[in-house]
Amino acid sequence: MGLSDIDRNLLERCLQKKSRAWEDFVDRFMGLVLHVIRHTAQSRSIRLSPEDRDDLCAEVFLAVIRNDFSVLRNFRSQSSLATYLTVVARRIVVRDLLARGPGARLAVGLQHSPQVIPDPHVSVEKQAIDREEVEQLLGSLQDTEALVVRMFHLEGKSYQEISTIVGMPENSIGPILSRAREKLRRAAVNSAVT
């Protein structure tokens, strides 16, 4: 799908710095940017506070206007503007989340998963217990799965880094993580029931 007339008009108005153009742009794409932020964080098993989400959203929109709208000026109309902004937003969000380091990650990406990151509001004893629970859950995985999950979620390594370490194709890491997360979810549910 190419550039729609509505988006073409909005793009031109922004680049010409017309009155209310930027406000209209933000109104049109705010939901999309927030969705990209939520989806990207969730897919990397990172919990974001509302403040973090707002900061990331602001960072995306700042990137769009930085250098006299260079992001918009680089748009080549080979896709919809929404598709282009999705890619731009995702890159910014991933870069920012990676810059936060592995401490921003959740253990296994479960809704009620034990938190393994240092939290000033949680006692050291509670964090140690949570870490033990995570280790037990990882014990329910095969060696390679456990290693991949540990490197991605606890150590913050990228797919490329994991691929190099474990000696498998980079495009195999995502499916391994997906299968492992499902096993961890089942193990967590089973341990909660017993």
Image (tube, helix red, strand yellow):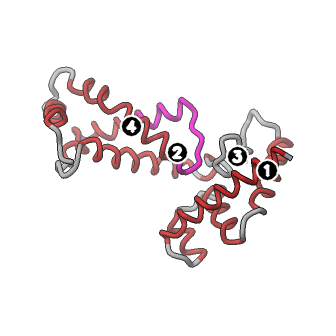
Assess whether residue 45 is covered by the magenta stretch: yes
Identify the residue position indicated by label 4 in the image: 33
Identify the residue position indicated by label 2 in the image: 41
Q: CA distance from mark 3 to mark 4?
A: 27 Å
Q: Specify which label sits upstream in the sequence, 1 or 3.
A: 3
Q: Specify which label sits upstream in the sequence, 2 or 1.
A: 2
* Relative vertical location of residue 94 with respect to residue 66 in this rendering, above or below: below
Q: Secondary structure at mark 2?
A: helix
Q: Secondary structure at mark 3?
A: loop
Badge 3 local density, few (<14 within 10 Å), some, or many (20+)?
Answer: some
Residue pushed farthest bottom?
A: 167
Identify the residue position indicated by label 1 in the image: 190
Q: CA distance from mark 1 to mark 3?
A: 24 Å
Q: Secondary structure at mark 4?
A: helix
Identify the residue position indicated by label 3 in the image: 117
Extent of the magenta region: 42-57
**Residue 176 picture location, percent across and down:** 59, 65
- Determine contact: label 2, label 1, CB under 8 Å: no
Instruction: Name the amino acid, label 4.
Output: Val
Q: Secondary structure at mark 1?
A: helix
